[in-house]
Image (spheres, coloured by chain):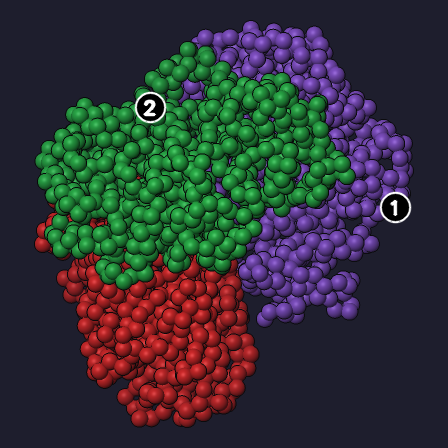
Chain colours: A purple, B red, C green
Amino acid sequence: MLENKILYGGDYNPEQWLNAPEILEKDIELFLKAKINTVTLGVFSWSVLEPQEGNYQLEWLRKIIDRLFENGIKTILGTPSAARPKWLSDKYPEVLRVRDNGVRNHFGGRHNHCYTSPVYREKVAMINTKLAEEFKDHPAVLMWHISNEFGGECHCELCQAAFRKWLSNQYESIDELNNKWWTMFWSHSYQSFDQIESPSSIGEQGVHGLNLDWRRFVTAQTADFINHEIHTLKKVGVKQPTTTNLMYSVTDVNYDKLAETIDIISWDTYPLWHKKEDILIAYDTGFWHDYMRSLKNQPFLLMESCPTSTNWQGVSKLKAPGLLEAASLQAVAHGSDSVLYFQMRQSRGSSEKFHGAVINNEGRDDARVFKEVVKTGVDLEKLGEVYNTATKAQVALIYDVENRWAISDSQGPRNDGMPYMDMVMKAYRALRRKGFDIDVISMEKEIKDYTLVVVPMLYMLRSGIEEKLEQYVSNGGTVIVTCWTGIVDECDRSFIGGTPHHLQEVVGLYSREIDGLYDWEQNSFVASEQSPFKAEYYCKNLCEVVEVTTAKVLMTFGSDFYRGYPAVTENQYKKGRAYYICADVEEKFYDDLLDIWTKEVKIKIPFSGKIPPDVEVNIRQGEEGKYIFVQNFSRENVDISCMKMEGEIIMGDDKMRLSPYATLVFKQNN
Amino acid sequence: MLENKILYGGDYNPEQWLNAPEILEKDIELFLKAKINTVTLGVFSWSVLEPQEGNYQLEWLRKIIDRLFENGIKTILGTPSAARPKWLSDKYPEVLRVRDNGVRNHFGGRHNHCYTSPVYREKVAMINTKLAEEFKDHPAVLMWHISNEFGGECHCELCQAAFRKWLSNQYESIDELNNKWWTMFWSHSYQSFDQIESPSSIGEQGVHGLNLDWRRFVTAQTADFINHEIHTLKKVGVKQPTTTNLMYSVTDVNYDKLAETIDIISWDTYPLWHKKEDILIAYDTGFWHDYMRSLKNQPFLLMESCPTSTNWQGVSKLKAPGLLEAASLQAVAHGSDSVLYFQMRQSRGSSEKFHGAVINNEGRDDARVFKEVVKTGVDLEKLGEVYNTATKAQVALIYDVENRWAISDSQGPRNDGMPYMDMVMKAYRALRRKGFDIDVISMEKEIKDYTLVVVPMLYMLRSGIEEKLEQYVSNGGTVIVTCWTGIVDECDRSFIGGTPHHLQEVVGLYSREIDGLYDWEQNSFVASEQSPFKAEYYCKNLCEVVEVTTAKVLMTFGSDFYRGYPAVTENQYKKGRAYYICADVEEKFYDDLLDIWTKEVKIKIPFSGKIPPDVEVNIRQGEEGKYIFVQNFSRENVDISCMKMEGEIIMGDDKMRLSPYATLVFKQNN
Amino acid sequence: MLENKILYGGDYNPEQWLNAPEILEKDIELFLKAKINTVTLGVFSWSVLEPQEGNYQLEWLRKIIDRLFENGIKTILGTPSAARPKWLSDKYPEVLRVRDNGVRNHFGGRHNHCYTSPVYREKVAMINTKLAEEFKDHPAVLMWHISNEFGGECHCELCQAAFRKWLSNQYESIDELNNKWWTMFWSHSYQSFDQIESPSSIGEQGVHGLNLDWRRFVTAQTADFINHEIHTLKKVGVKQPTTTNLMYSVTDVNYDKLAETIDIISWDTYPLWHKKEDILIAYDTGFWHDYMRSLKNQPFLLMESCPTSTNWQGVSKLKAPGLLEAASLQAVAHGSDSVLYFQMRQSRGSSEKFHGAVINNEGRDDARVFKEVVKTGVDLEKLGEVYNTATKAQVALIYDVENRWAISDSQGPRNDGMPYMDMVMKAYRALRRKGFDIDVISMEKEIKDYTLVVVPMLYMLRSGIEEKLEQYVSNGGTVIVTCWTGIVDECDRSFIGGTPHHLQEVVGLYSREIDGLYDWEQNSFVASEQSPFKAEYYCKNLCEVVEVTTAKVLMTFGSDFYRGYPAVTENQYKKGRAYYICADVEEKFYDDLLDIWTKEVKIKIPFSGKIPPDVEVNIRQGEEGKYIFVQNFSRENVDISCMKMEGEIIMGDDKMRLSPYATLVFKQNN
């Protein structure tokens, strides 16, 4: 546990103002007004910390940390590896990344460095060691923030060699690799590991096993780099916990693996509020909050968020009054123990100078945004007891980034766009509307304790997920499985002998064909009179033609040559049940499916009524009781009397009605 | 003549399953069920045939050929040059292609090799020699399939030198080249052939003569490579005929030249069935069948087609029941002596693992697709007598790939899109709807024996086509010529002294200006009371303003400042006539023009009525009589009584009605 | 003064026809018919003037100049540096440009040379010297045309070194540069000038100060190259004036700086007539005419324009009858002393062979286009007395290319598109509709003598524009300022302490926030009853939220959370007034604002009525009187009686009515 209160503050770059000490003093004054208790320092400070090679200048940083600490503000301390000084790449060009076409980048941007380069690792170790020696025992330093937003890849010769070595550890022989990657196709067999090159836009791109293993290698190399950074800190005695800030919907690396390297998950969120209905943005953001929490199944930190408009997005949209507060509290509702911003003070120049900040270049404390920051600070003080409470979800939704890699890389059945994320999100939103807390997990996680497991388009099977699902249903669990599941193994090799592989008995059917629909086409799900479904639904993109064995057909397709074929089935398998959805069906279907299912299966929710539109509900489970967050993500008042909520209000003032963007927190004692 | 029956089968890659002999046995069992008599082997087998340099392994191939032959299945044998082993490019990087920006590709994909490289030619010669020695007398080997789908280009120094040499053979002097390419413009004159570089996206792109000659050189170098491959086979005594598989709408090379290198034309067809009305897809596919047949004016082979959905297309659309049969028989109707698939057995991995196959990974003989393959096999046995019969077209449509190069490279009159292929296809479809068999020919072909020659947008004149057209009309032929004809010579140099060059007297007019229309603009063709046309038509893209000399004006433009100017003219020239169409007019115009023309000119068709919508008709001419194919390309029943067909039905069962996707074949004896 | 008549003619490339002397004779015959008095020679002649290194061939050029001069036709003589011969780059590859990714171009295209290369400068000096020696005293040579359409950039090592040197002259120290560029952000500080690299798509792109200074360096290097060319001419005694042809909407370089190097401004205009309403094209073209005239505040030359369709545009649209004349006279109306075409005779081959020409490949003098050229020639003879008369604008519109660089490079507030040019053009068109002559000027120009200064989105402040504006309003001037003004300094560093920087008192308000709107969003301007505005207007893209101090609110926003906040304000500041427009509002607003303003402020226009739609009015001020051009830019007749024009008609025939595309010129004596 870091602190016994919710962390509030954000990224702060005072090295931009070392010649203007009055700025620092002004900032502290405003921080205190806004209840700020934490800042992140040093993330991009390398060229100030080591202006020439070997010339370390840490004094300014200590002074700032001390000065903030005197005012009750603690520091999350960054290692500076995300942006290296010019002298470093000038002297050691090998630290710059090489693109897949073999061209080495010039200096510039961020993250433009090779994770393999021994020189880079050595230089990072040296500056990290200096920082660790200086700050390992500093009472203000809460934790270490390793680098920044890891991602990207390098194709230099050092990385090629490391890739070959990594592969030779994964496969017993080159023959095994050839077989797993199915390189016999188009005569691409390798005779030795030495022949292997990384995927390239001017070379090999069509061997999916190579592509997948390259992504796994990049993940492993990134994790190894993080471990290297942490090791340099621990070697000199750092005891504070570590984190690195993750991001929205990243597919460069597999965060499951990065999560293992650090103590605490943190992430940066920049939703496009107001781009569509706010509740949809809230669901989308909530999905990633849930994903981040589920990585370690423990509270996480909101490491970056924007106080107002975000300058690098297509449109710098102002947040409407109240939204900043709602979005901040939503993070806490989903399991965050912090609300941190990028950035505390606006930069004067360069690429993020128009990024929203707690304090802008005008520097006034009557700015609208600053006043909203103050209000949120007051809220968080009220919610102190929520700190470090848990989330206990009864539903798991399997979202797996390696599956996503494989689906988007695979040729067919819809190169014009596979609806994987759409299908994941349709199910997620329907579950949310029922008020369920949801764990968003990869195939590697345990599933046995959930009441419901939703499995959208699990094209690739790995980590024994097929056995886990079979066992889970055998023991009484419910699964909802969709089309295009169980097609390939972890190297993207088709299973022989029918699909969904290993699950045909569980779902009580087997698949015959899958039809890709053009963007303008649709089919429908229609119900017989006996069906529990009463409506008709449209479906798009993909329609699977299946043959049932033991499953009961609940709906059938309404058109095309497979009219009358099963579209939705239900199968009793041992003590459990499995639903199978044969197409990318519209979202309302999932609402109705959950209605049907919840009539038959008991699942606990902490209120007896229905959730009105535009409202999101989350629960954090403390030792004494539940904290139930009820939030209005619209610009209108919402009547919530229909929810029939019980419990003590610890934030908010009206049990029956939520004003625009308002949050109500109930406590129900155990 | 290869066999006295229609070849049925396709590409087979058993080298993927050498460790699973039960797969081969299972495959043969299913092949026999489906009436398969031919497979194509070895196309991508180099890394199995020569796993290390000089280590040749042909035994496995002989065993498979023998085993298939024991079961009555013959082999089309591929040379493996389309995909080289990794060791080859690792040791000899010169075999990999260089892009127009000077960057050499990495290993990967297919066809990634230089046609000029002496090393590559030598290595290909060696493996081909081994194959030829082994199989030249094998009774199962029907023919040799040289490499695969030739195309693409290389800009390496070896190719640059070959290009310069090729140019110095084409032109008497560098002055002649300068004049033909008009290099005085922008000071681009060359002082010697040594200075010439290939067109490059980071260098010269605006000298159209250079661009055209580069494409001609690439064609010549590709043809030379094919000749090299065939020579290595013949040198050791190969007597079987040769082919190479061509493709849809290719513009990399001029197939007229490649056709000269081989004995039999074959091609690969992957229509986007169901993407729009099937009859339109059928016309489009039919056009390319006709083009392929016309290359040598003899029956061709359908070398590849897909039994169901094609995974590398934007959407993997299933073929509706019956369509596989219809599409297969359409090839035969247009002159194919084979129906061959890619692929016989589905691959387990890599980029085409979801490509449709006769036998899929499930391996069941009750799969819908397999059952349709069986049905088509039964059909083809019925149609055995059609084998090697001819097509005798009375109409020629000039489609010339060099003209297409020049139109798409030329700056103006519509860089936003020149409607060359649209205009070709509008005429083609109208001719089809009249039931005419059509030869699709280049400018190099003889035209004297046709009743009608259609000449859409013949921008470039070469091979004396202007004299041939003049002679043809003089002798009584009819031509339909459109705007933007006769503009440039074979080096894309404008003709001096008016256009359409050499044809002004034939068409009885000369051109003054051409107007480019924006995408949203249109004009119209309007008729006076005397006109044989009774309707009004819209036109788009291009409107030519002409002045008539001897021509009769049939229609005029309806708007813009050239309202009232000629839009359609007819000219009597000596014994023949010439129609001139001044714009890219809507398709219905061509139907009405042909109606008007056929009232005056006799042209024979083998039925007395009209062809209903969605129906395609083709005729193959045997020694005893005509085989008339009547096919329904829709999902509805079609009444064909209006066609008033005569003759004996040799396939199908109802003279009056075609069920969805059904084919009827009549025989009319001579 | 060049001649006492309007120059008429254009670019002529007879070096393409040296083997066809009859072409030259035919051309002269047609030139005389068309009243041609001037041609431009030699622009792309280097490979004919110096076919091998050091082998100079100027005789052919002298002969052509002489032969034309005998026929009364004078020559504008080009230096040939825009397209170098093949031998030059073959021998000295350093002359070819290097791209921002470090790749050197191959030979090809035009302008593909490094302005820094000493070799290139030497070779240009040598050919220029030869030309100067030959033609410096030739009575036919009117002026020197330096190279062609300068633009583009080179990133070679020579340019990198020159850039570093240029920067070290701009900044006192590397610390100053770091501070101005704000490189502390993301650790991008430099320790020495030697470390600096040009912006690169594979390196640094986010340091706006670097990007801006790179553009300034490219401008300086281009100007230096022009100075070098002119110096080589003057060194051997050239006395004739110099020009270089500028272009439409160029942002590669800052034309203000290039203008200083030459004696006379000239430019090339290729409007997309008929792509939308012609009056809109006329306004757009007029804007650039005014910009070019304002560069030196003296008459300019129309150096290139197209007699008919322009082949390198998306669609080669024919100019409707009369438009050529209207467009040509419009240039004169805006201050041009010439009408020159590209090209006099059509090229036979290469990339511009279908570009419109006075004489096309058919070569007939009854061609429609040729006849329109003749008619325009006759007009220009009539307008001889307009030659060298001035334009006296009372309104200045600030359009500044460096401001445009900064807006388009800056991240936020709308990366999906900043409406800078839209806002400039909305104001311009409204001013035109009032009949005002307009100077289009950069921030560097003096503004004190104007009656009105319009300041759309002056994001960047430099050259003391803020002090000039303050002084101007103090002294009684009127400014119209819009949102997003006064944000950053000349290095794109935000001003501290509120915006619009230095102008808060002048406009009587300060800015709080700016909202980016999605493409589909809009807000509105609404008026209270007291407002002089009576309508409601929609606005898009950007809405600024301001707080007024002394300003009067004329309109407010109609929706979103800033509904009721000021949208339009008016402030009395000392003797003058300032309007502030808080959003990108629809164009009609500007018409109404000018109506309100002109009721209160006197501004002189030379007619008492209103200008009808589709009509443009321009005035040239001679010593004896005003020449008022009234032009109809539509295909319909327009009644102009409402304008109540006075004066003598010196061109045209009907004071009350303008036929399609007709021009009327009045003279009003002083």
In the foreground, C340 or B17: C340
Q: Position of residue B588 (x, y in %)?
A: 45, 75
The residue depicted at 49 percent of the width and 59 percent of the height is: C636
> Of discs 2 and 1, which sits in the foreground?
2
- Say above or below: C84 vs A96: below
Q: Position of residue B218 (x, y in %)?
A: 24, 54
Q: CA distance from mark 2 to mark 1?
A: 69 Å
The quarter of the displayed image where residue C530 is located = top right
As drawn, is A206 to the left or to the right of A292?
Answer: left
- Pointer 2 chain: C
**In the rendered view of the protein, which quadrant contains the C terminus of chain C?**
top left
Quickly name the residue at label 2.
C160
Judging from the image, what secondary structure is the residue with disc 1 in?
helix
Judging from the image, what secondary structure is the residue with disc 2 in?
helix
The residue depicted at 50 percent of the width and 67 percent of the height is: B276
- Say above or below: C614 vs B649: above
**In the rendered view of the protein, which quadrant contains the N terminus of chain C?**
top left
- Pointer 1 chain: A
Q: Is residue B261 visible?
A: yes
Give the amino acid at mark 2. Gln
The residue depicted at 42 percent of the width and 60 percent of the height is: B517
Q: Position of residue A607 (x, y in %)?
A: 86, 42
As drawn, is A456 to the left or to the right of C3?
Answer: right
Give the amino acid at mark 1. Cys
- Say above or below: A472 vs C133: below
Q: Position of residue B58 (x, y in %)?
A: 27, 57
**Residue A642 bears which disc, if any?**
1
